[in-house]
């Protein structure tokens, strides 16, 4: 009987893509609403979020080029968004210690408050994700990591600071099913539920080594570890 539905249904990958597209539409609508409350366009709100996430104490203030890369927009589009944030008093520029010719972007006090508000826009998604069981949340996180990495490999999104592409990541280095992986940066085991999507300490592996580590992670082979 299942063969009947195999012929009637759209391919599973297409239905998944359609569902994800609906989630994306809901999130964009939420972002519009919160952005409008602060007088921000979605691009300006996203730029504010990037500056907030990438900057902060002990980190280099992000440059305009980094904001453009993370938003997957052209440099002029990012420049317009940042200029608007500057005019609104939410963002300021400071000298970049890495390059005297460049400047970094930092949030003002008002910008920090606005970024906090803008950061609340996925609250509806947070509540929905919380409805999933812990095991479902862990499984979904692993799948999200795989999809982000797949988009990154296709050049569809900017490189993300994922655990699975980091030099410090040791997949399945331990026999503990709850914490099979190892982070060499903090020298501690961790599990899929701890996988990060944007780790500030991430040190990306060269492509060839990253492929080896990725294969070991997706194979789920206990005891596997990446090259030194």
Image (tube, rainbow, N blue to C red):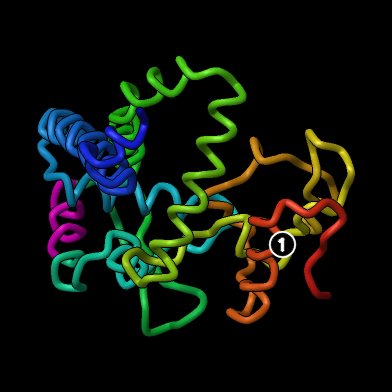
Quarter of the image that includes the C terminus: bottom right
Horizontal and vertical percent position of residue 90? 25, 46
Horizontal and vertical percent position of residue 93? 32, 63
The total of numbered circles placed on residues is 1
Q: Is residue 216 left or right of residue 16?
A: right
Q: Residue at x 87, y 55 (%)?
A: 223
Residue 120 sits above or below residue 224 on the image: above
Q: Quadrant of residue 54?
A: bottom left
Q: Which residue has dot 1 on it?
A: 216
Name the residue at the front extreme. Answer: 1
Q: Residue at x 80, y 52 (%)?
A: 172
223 vs 77, nearest the viewer: 223
Residue 217 sits above or below residue 23 on the image: below
Q: Is residue 46 left or right of residue 146?
A: left
Residue 99 sits above or below residue 63 on the image: below
Horizontal and vertical percent position of residue 221? 78, 54
228 vs 133, nearest the viewer: 133
Q: Is residue 54 magenta?
A: no
Q: Quadrant of residue 12?
A: top left
Horizontal and vertical percent position of residue 156? 31, 66
How many residues crowd around disc 1 within 10 Å: few (fewer than 14), some, or many (20 or more)? Answer: some
Q: Secondary structure at mark 1?
A: helix
Q: Residue at x 50, y 53 (%)?
A: 146
103 vs 176, nearest the viewer: 176
Q: Is residue 30 left or right of residue 113?
A: left
Q: What residue range appears in magenta? A: 80-88
Name the residue at the top extreme. Answer: 131
Q: Residue at x 20, y 35 (%)?
A: 22
Q: Would you say residue 111 is visible in this rendering?
A: yes
Residue 72 sits above or below residue 58 on the image: below
Q: Would you say residue 110 is visible in this rendering?
A: no
Q: Quadrant of residue 8?
A: top left
């Amino acid at each position: 009987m299942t063969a009947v539905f195999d012929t009637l249904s759209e391919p599973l990958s297409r239905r998944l893509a359609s569902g994800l597209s609906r989630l994306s539409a809901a999130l964009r609508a939420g972002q519009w609403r919160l952005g409008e409350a602060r007088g921000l366009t979605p691009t300006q709100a996203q730029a504010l979020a990037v500056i907030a996430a990438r900057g902060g104490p002990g980190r280099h203030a992000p440059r305009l080029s980094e904001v453009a890369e993370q938003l997957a927009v052209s440099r002029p589009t990012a420049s317009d968004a940042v200029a608007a944030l500057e005019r609104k008093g939410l963002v300021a520029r400071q000298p970049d210690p890495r390059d005297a010719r460049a400047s970094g972007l930092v949030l003002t006090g008002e910008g920090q408050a606005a970024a906090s508000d803008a950061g609340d826009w996925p609250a509806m998604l947070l509540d929905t994700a919380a409805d999933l069981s812990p095991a479902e949340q862990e499984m979904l996180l692993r799948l999200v990591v795989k999809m982000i990495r797949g988009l990154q490999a296709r050049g569809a999104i900017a490189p993300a600071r994922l655990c699975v592409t980091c030099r410090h990541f040791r997949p399945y280095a331990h026999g503990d099913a709850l914490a099979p992986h190892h982070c060499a940066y903090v020298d501690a085991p961790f599990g899929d539920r701890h996988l990060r999507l944007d780790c500030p300490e991430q040190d990306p592996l060269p492509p060839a080594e990253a492929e080896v580590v990725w294969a070991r992670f997706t194979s789920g082979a206990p005891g596997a570890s990446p090259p030194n």
